[in-house]
Amino acid sequence: MQPAVSIQQLEKTYASGFRALKSVDLDIRRGEIFALLGPNGAGKTTLISIVCGIVTPSGGRVVADGHDIVRDYRAARQKIGLVPQELSTDAFESVWATVRFSRGLYGRPRDDAYLEGLLRDLSLWDKRDSKILALSGGMKRRVLIAKALSHEPTILFLDEPTAGVDVELRHDMWQMVRRLRERGVTVILTTHYIEEAEDMADRIGVINKGELVVVEDKDVLMRRLGRKQLTLALQAPLERIPDELSGLPLELSGDHLSLVYTFDTQTEETGIADLLRRLGTHGIDFRDLNSSESSLEEIFVGLVHGSEGGRR
Ligand SMILES: Nc1ncnc2c1ncn2[C@@H]1O[C@H](COP(=O)(O)OP(=O)(O)O)[C@@H](O)[C@H]1O
Ligand SMILES: [Mg+2]
C-alpha cells in the first residue's frame, strides 16, 4: 500500500547556513499514529513545515497522499491538516466564520453539518459566535484544531499539541486523535513528552540534530531497547558492594538500603539466579524485590545520547 507520506533524502539548510535536516528518509503508513520525538531544536517543526508547504526544502522529495508537495502543491495541501505549534489566528473573526473560511480556502464545498459536528466534538459549539480574541488559550487551541480539520484532511499533523495545555484539553485531544484514526486518518504528532508517545503512538521516530536516529514500532522499540531492573530492598544497610560482586551490573542506592541489578530483556540468561545465590554466600539478605522495565524516556535518552557519542 502506498504510504500516507513518503519523505526521501529531505534536506533543509536555512538561510543562516544552519543545516536543520540531514537527509531524512521516512515513510508514514496509512492510518497510523506516528510520534516524532526529539529534543528542542531537533528539526521536528522544520520537517512538518516542509511537508505542509510552509518551509521550502533544500533537497529531497516529499509525497503526501500520492501528491508531490512541490509540483502538486494544492492537491497535496488539501489532504493535509496542520495544528501548528504557535497560536496564531485571525482574532476578530468568530469561531464559526473562521472555520468555514478555512474549509473554503482548500476548495471544499460548504458542509455546515460537518462543521457543526466538528465544533461539537471540540466543545466549541457554544462558542461558535464568539470572537477568537475573546477566547481562552485552551479554546484558541481548540479552534486551531477545528481549522486544521475543517477541510476533512486524510493526514493530520499536530506540532507539540499538548505543550502548555490543560488536562481536559489534552484528554479531549487524544480522544479525538483516536476517533480520527478509526476513520482512517493518519496522524503525525511531535512531542517531547515521552509519555504521550508511549500512550498514543503506533510507531515512533526519534530525531536528533536533524537526523532521524531510529524509526520503529513502539512495542518493538520498547522491547528491543528496553532494560529491566531488579531492585532488592536489603534487610540491613550495606556499606559497599563486595569486591567479588563488583563485575556485576549492580549498584548500591545512595541510602545503602537497596541494590539495583540491571539486565537486558533480550538475553535468555538474566543472571538473577546466580546473583541471588552469590548474595546469599555473602550474607546479604533482602526483604523484598521487584522488577521494573525501562520507560520510553530512558530509551530515548539513551538513543539521543548514543547518536551524539557516535559522531564525536
Ligand atoms: N527560520 C530559521 N532560520 C534559521 N534557523 C532556524 C529557523 N527555523 C528553525 N531554525 C533552527 O533549526 C533547528 C530546528 O528547529 P525546529 O525545526 O524548530 O526544531 P524543533 O521543532 O525540533 O524544536 C533549530 O536549531 C532552530 O534554531
Ligand atoms: Mg518545534
Image (cartoon, rainbow, N blue to C red):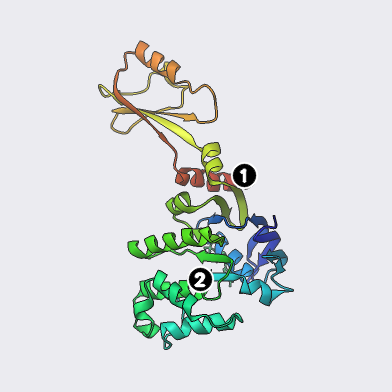
Residue type indicated by callout 1: Gly
Can the viewer see residue 121 in this picture? yes
Which image quarter holds the N terminus? bottom right
The answer to which of marks 2 and 1 sits earlier in the sequence is 2
Label 2 – label 1 distance at C-alpha: 33 Å
Crowd tier of the residue under label 1, counting other residues whose Cα lies within 10 Å: few below 14, some 14–19, many 20 or above: few
| Residue 303 or residue 87, whichever sits in front | 87
Left or right of 73, for residue 248: left
* Residue ID for mark 1: 310
Rendered location of residue 229, percent (x, y): 42, 31
Looking at the picture, does residue 24 appear above or below residue 14?
A: above
Crowd tier of the residue under label 2, counting other residues whose Cα lies within 10 Å: few below 14, some 14–19, many 20 or above: some
Q: Residue at x 62, y 74 (%)?
A: 78
On residue 84, the disc is: 2
Residue type indicated by callout 2: Pro
- Asked if disc 1 is less than 8 Å from ligand 1, the answer is no
| Residue 240 or residue 229, whichever sits in front | 229
Viewer-nearest of discs 2 and 1 = 2
Left or right of 84, for residue 16: right
Can the viewer see residue 40 in this picture? no
Helix, strand or loop at disc 2? loop
Residue situated furthest top in the rendering: 281
Rendered location of residue 266, percent (x, y): 54, 30
